Each structure stands twice: as C-alpha cells, then as structure tokens.
Image (cartoon, rainbow, N blue to C red):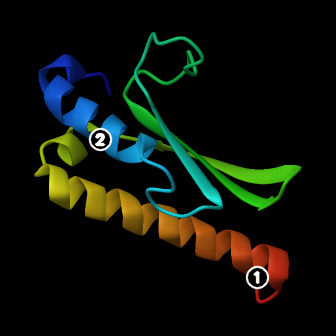
Amino acid sequence: MKYNFEKYKDKLDALRTYLTEAEAISPEIEVKLFLPGEKDADPNIKVPYLHVCYYVNEDRCHIRKIELFEYYLQEDIKELINKITAMVEEFAMEVDQSEYGGG
C-alpha cells in the first residue's frame, strides 16, 4: 500500500540520524533506512524500509527488510524507535536460535 511518506520527512530524518549513530542498536547489527527511489533502494518496495543486516561473522550476515507502513510513522519518534529496536532484537534472537541451536 502506497502512501505519501514525504509528510513524515522530519520523522524519517530523525530516524535516519539515530540509525547512523555508531552502533545505535548493536555492534553486530547494521540498520539502514531507505526511501523509495533512493540510490541502492530496492525498487520493488514502495514504502520507506529498514535494511537490517545481522553479522554472524565478518563474511556472513542475515538480512531482513522491515517496511515502515504509515501506522508506524504515525507514532511518536521515541515509540517508533522502541518498536524498531524490538523488531531488530527479535530478528537477532531468531538468527541466534537458527545459528547456535534451539531453532
């Protein structure tokens, strides 16, 4: 579902700033924000999204893309960051379970 994400520009800019801070979530996890039409963005995704890469070692990472639908961007920035952090941590737990047993 497409929506006018430009009206959330300030919030997306604040989120991008937070995510580009060194190790904002974890040293092993890289999170980048992409907007539709940006260089290197997935042309098949029509909403802002997070590209999450969890490095299990230097040569290998697990990737998840989290689409930021409008209901996420309607949240207060602190609540949005909390939700994103929770989603990324859940992804990391899934990877840990599959990599190191129990999954």
Q: In the picture, residue 5 is in which quadrant?
A: top left
Q: Which label was assigned to residue 103? A: 1
Q: Which label was assigned to residue 15? A: 2
Reply above or below: 69 against 90: above
What residue is rendered at 35% in x and 36% in y? 16
Total marks drawn?
2
Q: Position of residue 49 (x, y in %)?
A: 43, 35
Reply above or below: 57 against 51: below
Reply above or below: 53 against 43: below
Farthest right residue in view: 59
Q: Dot 2 lies on which element?
A: helix
What residue is rendered at 16% in x and 50% in y? 77
Q: Position of residue 65 (x, y in %)?
A: 55, 43
What residue is rendered at 70% in x and 69% in y? 95
Specify the quadrant that holds the N terminus: top left
Q: Is residue 44 left or right of residue 2?
A: right
Which of the pair 1/19 is nearer the observer? 19
Q: Tell me the amino acid under the disc marked 2.
A: Leu
Farthest bottom residue in view: 102
Specify the quadrant that holds the C terminus: bottom right
Q: Position of residue 66 (x, y in %)?
A: 47, 45
Reply above or below: 4 against 16: above
Q: Nearer the viewer, mark 1 or mark 2?
A: 2
Earlier residue among tags 1 and 2: 2
Q: Is residue 44 left or right of residue 8?
A: right
Q: Is residue 82 left or right of residue 40?
A: left
Q: Position of residue 9 (x, y in %)?
A: 19, 24
Q: Tell me the amino acid under the disc marked 1.
A: Gly
Within 10 Å of disc 1 (Cα), the crowding (few <14, some 14-19, many 20+) is few
Q: Dot 1 lies on which element?
A: loop
What residue is rendered at 19% in x and 45% in y? 71
